[in-house]
Image: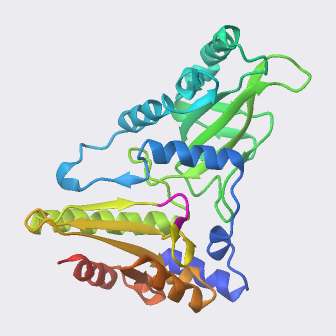
Amino acid sequence: LKPELTQIMDHFRGGRPRSITSVRQYTPPPLARQLWRLMRLARLNHLPPVQSSAPPSISAEFSRLRAAAENVLVSKGVPLARVLGTHPEAYTSNRLFAQIRQVQRASSNEAPLQGFLALFARSASQETIHGAEGADIQLEGGVVTAPGISLLDDGPFLILAVIGDRAGQGGLAALRAYAQPIYSATQFMPVMTTLGRSLVKSLNSIRWSLAKRRSDLPISLEMPLFALETSGGPVRPDIMIEVSSTITGEVRTTSLFVEAQYEDASIAAHLRDSVGPVFSVLPADLENEDAFKRRLTSALLF
């Protein structure tokens, strides 16, 4: 975690942090919210206990995404799955264009139908998605992501692109896209910052270690994509950790917050008052990963 600590401190020395507090105040574009809803419906923002999880794979993640797309309508009677591609070849071969036109012809909706392309990408640029197997997708508009995230350096990403008519040119093309940073190529858990990815890596290490010592304590992780409604107002934890006991049946959910992400300490205090059990990641934790793991492991044990 130490490189991320340096990044945080550099931001604070320069004034308002670029990729920390600004992420919390970020108003996502509609395409981002659409991708987040789809990821939440597919449970991509949830990592089940290691005791009951199958080996992760990119094919399994896309299978979950396509299954969720069956339950999302893009127009009356048209599920997203019918106009969704999940591989660059679906776009470069024009197969996705044919699907969209076929659905449009069968639809009673006179408005032009849009399609979508969901891709795994190691990186992107402002106008290009660098897809799997060297396949690049050019966009008429551009690729955007959250504040402080580098499209070139902070991947991998799950990218959702809109497919529609070229303005005044005829034909279909990828118009614009949103790039969501994810944990890995085989686990599409969304992360909001590179620091978030490091935290998930540490938490996974703790989960595997505890699973060997305490198989009776399954631990799952969830990355909230939208704010939770609480008595103190909307709150979005950085990560939610659920620990259950197979012996007693007790279940406990702990909300993890990175306190270095708050310029005003009263915000973190408000969060502690609103969401119940809270584990705060302090700046000192980011300097010593081993000490952080010991402190969190102790907090999770019943």
Tell me where residue 4 appears, x and y as whole percent.
52, 75
Query: In percent of the image, x 46 and y 30: which residue is there?
Result: 66
Q: Residue furthest front?
A: 231
Snapshot quadrant of residue 295 = bottom left
Query: Quadrant where the C terminus lies?
Result: bottom left
40 left or right of 144 in image: left
Above or below residue 128? Residue 301 is below
Query: In percent of the image, x 59 and y 21: which residue is there?
Result: 77
Number of labelled discs?
0
User: What is the chief secondary structure element of the magenta stretch?
Assistant: loop
Query: In percent of the image, x 53 and y 57: which residue is there?
Result: 225
Which residues fall within the magenta stretch?
A: 224-228
Q: Is residue 1 shown to the viewer in this render?
A: no
Q: 34 and 157: which one is in front?
A: 34
Tell me where residue 26 appears, x and y as whole percent.
69, 65
Q: Is residue 160 shown to the viewer in this render?
A: yes
Query: In percent of the image, x 59 and y 77: which residue is there?
Result: 7
Q: Residue furthest right?
A: 168
Magenta includes 280? no
Tell me where residue 200 appears, x and y as whole percent.
39, 64
